[in-house]
Image (cartoon, rainbow, N blue to C red):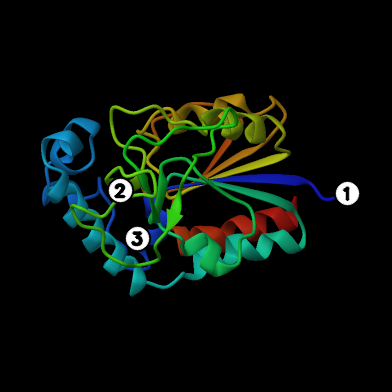
């Protein structure tokens, strides 16, 4: 039986694909006010601004490609039972070949009615895949409501966090790559791993956690994945 490997990925994985991160120096939050374009209050205050912002991100994603880190994570499925939990709203994990990807913060290529509801398992109803198309004011869902980005805005609950916790609890190995561990509740997921489960973190910066299980690979995602795979081979 294959060991279960759970990957938690963040913006640093996609940064090397040229997909702009939010928090890093030169990131999107230096160009935009987060409360204007990524909060539920911002949505109700100025829907057009929010739609325009995500239309731009969608076009940027269309022109991006998976990098070596995405491909390496997908390739792990050959030898491990892999689940990817991602904070990213892009589809680069899927395009690299990962077959089980749980998007904590939504998906950029999808929209839903602004009055959309959730099933008990955290999955959303009436989600529409639009690919890289634009959405503008007046574009309505089948129920007659304005379409909004299928994104978990600041100020909203993270409906799939319970599913993510369940996956981490089952992990034999956990890999955290490309995330600063500053965004909760995702940042606390590793704490749900079994005591004997090793936790590897790939990040070029210091990480704000202290846990004897953690092995910190201080590198960017692509180089760090090479080192991680080498460590797996030697373990």
Q: Residue at x 24, y 33 (%)?
A: 40
- Counting from the top left corner in percent of width and height, residue 115 is at 34, 34
Q: Earlier in the sequence, mark 1 or mark 2?
A: 1
Q: Residue furthest right?
A: 1
Q: Secondary structure at mark 2?
A: strand
> Label 3: how many residues lie within 10 Å, few (<14), some (14-19) or many (20+)?
some
Instruction: Please name which of the two marks, 2 or 3, marks the residue nearer to the observer.
Output: 2
Q: Which residue is mark 3?
A: 15
Residue at (49, 32) in percent of width and height: 118
For residue 219, say whether it is visible: no
Give yes or no for contact between labels 1 and 2 (Cβ–Cβ under 8 Å). Answer: no
For label 1, the crowd category at 10 Å Cα-Cα, with few meaning under 14, some 14 to 19 and many 20 or more, is few
Q: Which residue in the structure is indicated by mark 1?
A: 1
Q: Residue 26: percent from the left, percent from the top?
A: 17, 55
57 displayed left or right of 216? left
Query: What residue would you read off at disc 2?
Result: 147
Task: Report helix, strand or loop for mark 3.
Answer: helix
Q: Residues within 10 Å of mark 2 (few under 14, many from 20)?
A: many
Quarter of image, res 52: bottom left
**Nearest to the observer: residue 150 or residue 63:** 150
Q: Whole-percent x and y of residue 41?
A: 18, 30
Residue 39: x and y, percent?
A: 23, 35
- Give the quadrant of residue 12: bottom left
Left or right of 171: which side holds 206? left
Residue drawn at x 43%, y 44% is 87
Label 1 and label 2: CA atoms lie apart by 44 Å
Is any part of residue 75 visible from this angle? yes
Which mark, residue 110? none
Q: Nearer the viewer, residue 7 or 130?
A: 130
Residue at figure coordinates x 18%, y 48% from the top left: 50
Label 1: element kind: loop
């Amino acid at each position: 039986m294959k060991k279960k490997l759970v990957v938690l990925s963040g913006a640093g994985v996609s940064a090397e694909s040229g997909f702009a991160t939010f928090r890093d120096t030169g990131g999107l939050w230096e160009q935009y006010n987060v409360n204007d374009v990524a909060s539920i209050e911002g949505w109700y205050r100025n829907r057009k601004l929010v739609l325009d912002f995500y239309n731009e991100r969608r076009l940027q994603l269309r022109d991006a490609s998976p990098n070596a880190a995405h491909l390496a994570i997908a390739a792990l499925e050959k030898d491990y039972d892999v689940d990817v939990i991602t904070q990213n709203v892009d589809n680069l994990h899927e395009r690299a070949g990962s077959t089980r990807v749980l998007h904590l913060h939504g998906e950029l290529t999808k929209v839903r009615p602004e009055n959309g509801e959730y099933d008990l398992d955290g999955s959303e109803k009436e989600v529409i895949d639009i690919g890289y198309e634009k959405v503008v004011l007046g574009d309505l869902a089948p129920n007659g409501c304005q379409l909004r980005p299928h994104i978990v805005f600041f100020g909203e609950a993270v409906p799939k966090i319970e599913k993510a916790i369940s996956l981490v609890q089952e992990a034999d190995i956990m890999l955290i790559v490309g995330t600063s561990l500053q965004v909760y509740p995702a940042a606390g997921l590793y704490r749900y791993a079994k005591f004997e489960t090793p936790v590897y973190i790939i990040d070029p910066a210091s990480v704000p956690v202290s846990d004897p299980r953690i092995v910190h690979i201080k590198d960017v995602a692509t180089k760090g994945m090479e080192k991680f795979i080498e460590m797996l081979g030697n373990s």
